[in-house]
Image: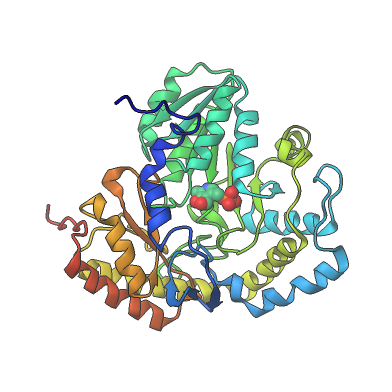
Amino acid sequence: MTPPPPTATASIGRHYDDLDRLRRLNPMYDAVIDEIDGRMIRIGDQWLADFASCNYLGFDLDPEIMDAVEPMVRRWGTHPSWSRLLGNPRPYVEIEERLTELLGAPDTLVLPTISHIHSTVIPLLAGQGTVLMDGQAHKTIYDGCSIARGRGATLVRFPANDPWALEQELRLTAPGAPRVVCMDGVNSMTGNVPDLATFAHICREYDALLYVDDAHGFGVIGDSPDAAHPYGLRGNSIVRHVGESYDNVVLVGGFSKAYSSLLAFLALPTELKNFLKVAAPTYLYSGPSPTASLATVLAGFDVNATRGEAIRADLHDKTARVISTVNALGLYTPNASGLPIVELPLTRAEDIDEVGNFLFARGVYVTLAAYPLVPRSQVGFRVQVTAANTHEEITHLCDVLRELCQRFDMAAAVPDSL
Ligand SMILES: Cc1ncc(COP(=O)(O)O)c(C=O)c1O
């Protein structure tokens, strides 16, 4: 019998079948969180320790930051509603001034989300020139680069985290037209910090603009790392962390991870900021962040200034406990930085459903890194530690990881001697 002809929608989204199966069948995806208690979450009858949060500094649960919301909402209403071009409540100005000082940048521009920024700013920077994209750049960067290509830019991918391969590509592009190099700062999968100094040096040599998304670094890494402060000071992001300048560098970051708020930023020269104010649709048309977000960003700056170093030290120690357990178990993780993103690949990608169920049943909530979010060879799960996770939760996670290794084949660490 001939099969029925496909309907108009039947062929849409086949690429996402694996993920859709997990979404339908695995409790770790598309879950409804019924209640939270600190970093414990309740899904139905099950309480779980949450290791899938990106609220690295625990600002979402900080009473001082919570207290800042109501007074500002009383003063400014719940939502400004003007697009930024039409009207900027004064807190925007304060946020940009304080952020510029924190980052040590020439200027800053805040917009609702990083995704908005990539999709509107990358095409404007690239024009009819060339976008050179790191092979493992975040999907939202990839989307921005694809839009740039659709508007006439040439898109070139260079091997992930390889500045010398980038240099080869830059040699091949004609000078004159814009050249924009797009990459991640702290990598959202591996937790590692790229060799930004070499990338910046090469970009300056070829008069290219280095556009870096440090969504996961802002708030966590900063100035002058040393043995006493392994993450560095002030959480002022990757450019300061590696001791670089902002010459030829546009830094993008967000408040939706470490700062637990809904706002994002570009650190850039004032000239470029003024261009974006008239050209970037997200400045011209998008609804702005709610007043509560502006309030939590400003209060976040205060807490960062007074307690930030202690919070980062605590986050570092809690992460170190997880990583030392991973190492003692002989598991492979790409994390070589000690930052709070610990990816644990599986030997067999098809185990992901069962691993998700196992962790859920043991009360541990993680991010499942399933295909096509990652290549099949990297399927596994990711543990993200936040300062709001308790030591008891970390102990429980480590116990569950020990048990997990007995039940499933996890990718093994390669011994140093090999
Ligand atoms: C590297 C990176 N960039 C951008 C985003 C998206 O940020 P936003 O929520 O501000 O759009 C994420 C979030 O997953 C991310 O990991």
Left or right placement of residue 55 versus residue 157 in this view: right
- Residue at 16%, 57% (x, y): give it: 416
Residue pushed farthest bottom? 392
Out of 407 and 200, give the one closest to the viewer. 407
Classify residue 300 as left or right of residue 365.
right
Q: For the view shown, which residue lies furthest in the left direction?
A: 418
**Number of marks in picture:** 0
Up-down relation of residue 325 to residue 129 (above or below): below
Relative to 170, 408 lies left or right: left
Percent across and percent down for residue 297 are 69, 63
Residue at 37 percent of width and 75 percent of height: 363
- Protein image colouring: rainbow
Coordinates of residue 334 in the picture (x, y in percent): 30, 54
Q: From the viewer's perspective, tell me whether residue 273 is left or right of residue 40.
A: right
* Residue 389 % position (x, y): 46, 76
Kindly indicate the quadrant of the structure image that contains residue 299: bottom right
Which residue occupies the foreground of this view, 139 or 248?
139
Query: Can residue 89 be seen here?
Result: yes
Percent of width and height locating residue 360: 36, 69
Residue under the image location 43 percent in, 18 percent down: 172
Residue 47 lies in what quarter of the image? Answer: bottom left
From the viewer's side, name the closer residue of 374 and 227. 374
Q: Quadrant of the N terminus?
A: top left
Q: Is residue 207 above or below residue 64?
A: above
Relative to 388, say whether 350 is above or below: above
Quarter of the image where one finds residue 340? bottom left
What residue is rendered at 64% in x and 46% in y? 267
Q: Is residue 214 visible?
A: no
